[in-house]
Image: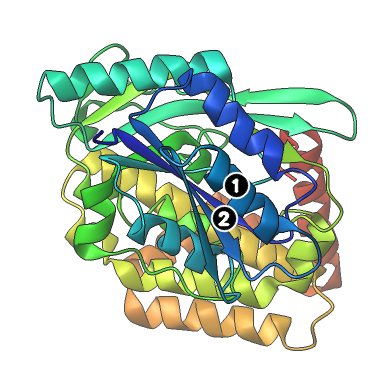
Amino acid sequence: MDKIITFGIPCYNSAAYMDTCIQSILDGSDGAQDIEIVIVDDGSFKDNTAAKADEWAEKYPEVIKAVHQENGGHGTAVLTGLSNATGTFYKVVDSDDWLDADALSALLQKIRETEAAHADVDLFIANYVYEHSVDNTQHVVDYTRVLPEGRVFGWHEIGHFNITQNLLMHALCYRTSVLREEGVPLPAHTFYVDNIYAWVPLPRCKRMFYLNEDLYRYFIGREDQSVNEKVMASRIDQQVLITRIMMESYHIYDDVQIPQLRSYMINYFVIMMSICSVFSRLSERPDAMDELERLWSDLHAYDRRMWRRCRLGIMGQATNLPGRLGKSITLALYHLANKFVKFN
């Protein structure tokens, strides 16, 4: 049977939680044979992730594939899932996260309907939920009053995204051909590649559909998780690399013609530069601030208009205050924002 969607699940030493992720997709699809799950074992060696992947594939051979590779990092695993996908659409689900069954059922129904109607949707967007394990709270990110509901739309019809409403990887389900035709520059052995995945392909998408369902459940709470504050500070070099790749992907003001999409992408990039500025100050790496200054200098040389927007705007100034006092104020503002938004 032709597959309407492929779910790529990157797994690295994920034996403790990958079953929940996989089962959530099976539950939400209600045994449908037109879905596909590609489990990518990214060189796991500390547990029985590889064996679990093979067990799932053996149990559901018509739906699940197990792919094993040498360790290449999250981005490489995402691309391996994509290269093995046969589905019309492709969605990444990290192995420590899961999907809501009812919301997934609604998404699959809508994909089938729009495909039958030849609506040529390039991107499905749904809500995601931060699941905070430490205090057992949830935070829903939705796009009501920002994206049109119940119909196909173009970027010229979108509203203004606030700072908590970015289209992260968890919200996105791309048409597979959109990702494959021009590729997605995800570097190996690098965290935070989801920012590239959720930004670079957007101008290729012409027709979108927003499903106001709380689909993706994003687990927050492991001490070794990539979004943990200490972990992010220790990996600031990778955050800088990701931001540099995004910077070099476009001259936004020249390459993105639709004003609404251009505005969104600029604001997202402003946040990326602000994250680099904050975590360079939190980092204990001796070269962190030198790398940050090099990034700002390269942005100035690459796209002076974008540099002005990032560096001279409110966020750029607030996250780059000079001196020890400035650093203290910058970090205090960051921790205050995190207290309310709880993004890591």
x 60%, y 47%: residue: 94
The residue closer to the viewer here, 46 or 141, is: 46
The disc at residue 94 is 1
Dot 1: what SS? loop
Q: In percent of the image, x 47 and y 22: which residue is there?
A: 31
Quadrant of the rendered image containing residue 26: top right
Instruction: Provide residue 52's location: percent of width, then percent of height.
Output: 68, 51
Q: Are marks 1 and 2 in contact (CB under 8 Å)?
A: yes
Residue 238 in the image, given as x and y percentages of width and height: 61, 73
Task: Residue 116: name its quadrant.
Answer: top left
Task: For residue 103, say whether it is visible.
Answer: yes
Image quadrant occupied by the N terminus: top left
Q: Secondary structure at mark 2?
A: strand
Q: Identify the residue position indicated by label 2 in the image.
A: 10
- Within 10 Å of disc 1 (Cα), the crowding (few <14, some 14-19, many 20+) is many
Viewed as shown, does residue 141 lie left or right of 246?
A: right
Amino acid at pointer 2: Pro
Question: How is the structure coloured here?
Answer: rainbow
Q: Is residue 154 left or right of residue 243?
A: left
Residue 145 in view of the camera: no
Q: Position of residue 51 (x, y in %)?
A: 68, 57
Tag 2 or tag 1, which sits nearer the N-term?
A: 2
Left or right of 114 on screen, residue 78: right
Near-viewer residue (21 or 189):
21
Q: Does 95 sit above or below residue 49?
A: above
Amino acid, disc 1: Asp
Q: Which mark is residue 163?
A: none
| Residue drawn at (28%, 66%) of the image | 250
